[in-house]
Image (spheres, rainbow, N blue to C red):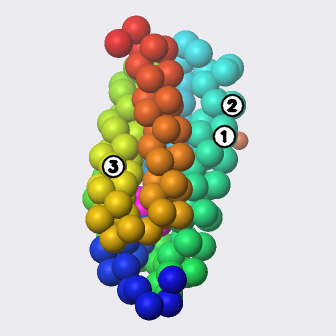
Amino acid sequence: MTEHTYPQTKQVLNQAVADIYKAISIIRQAHWYMRGQGFLYLHKQMDKLIDGLDGHLDELSERLIMLGGAPYSTLKEYDQVSQLVEVEGSFEVPMAERLNRLVDLYEYLATLYRQGLAVTDEENEAVANGLFADALADAEKVSWMLKAELSR
Ligand SMILES: [Fe+2]
């Protein structure tokens, strides 16, 4: 492990740290601000999504440290590095629009995780590769579930 530096792997791991952190913030907003049909289970479901992402966040950031990297750890860095876009909280967003935004969020994450798979494959970093595979499996499952809820 020490004879390699894995530059691209470290970069994509840190991108994932920033993006997942910001994704959690966006989902927490949905948890707090949602109103409408499905609230009683969707409100709780948001907590499960947050727990899932938080697990990947911790695994990916700790792998980054093991490879000699330094994970972003401030709100400012997360905001500057992540391409995810936050909007001010509003109770007026229709439930379907809120869920559609979450589908977009998870598709963004899935694309990032696929980049992580490609880069870790290229640099032959099998552990991070496995972490990205796990995260991708979750992201695709959540996208599928959200779309099924939306009859998409
Ligand atoms: Fe809560």
**How far is disc 3 from disc 2 in space, using C-alphas?**
28 Å
User: Is 22 one of the magenta-colored residues?
Assistant: no
Q: Position of residue 73 (x, y in %)?
A: 52, 78
Q: Quadrant of ligand 1?
A: top right
Badge 3: how crowded within 10 Å, few (<14), some, or many (20+)? some
**How far is disc 1 from disc 3 in space, using C-alphas?**
25 Å
Which segment is the magenta one?
16-20
Dot label at residue 44: 2
- At 57% across and 55% down in the image, what residue appears? 56
Residue under numbered circle 3: 114
Q: Amino acid at mark 2?
A: Lys
**How far is disc 1 from disc 2 in space, using C-alphas?**
5 Å
**Marks 1 and 2 close (CB-CB < 8 Å):** yes
Q: Secondary structure at mark 2?
A: helix
Dot label at residue 47: 1
Dot label at residue 55: none
Q: Secondary structure at mark 3?
A: helix
- At 64% across and 30% down in the image, what residue appears? 45
Residue nearer the viewer, 89 or 74: 74
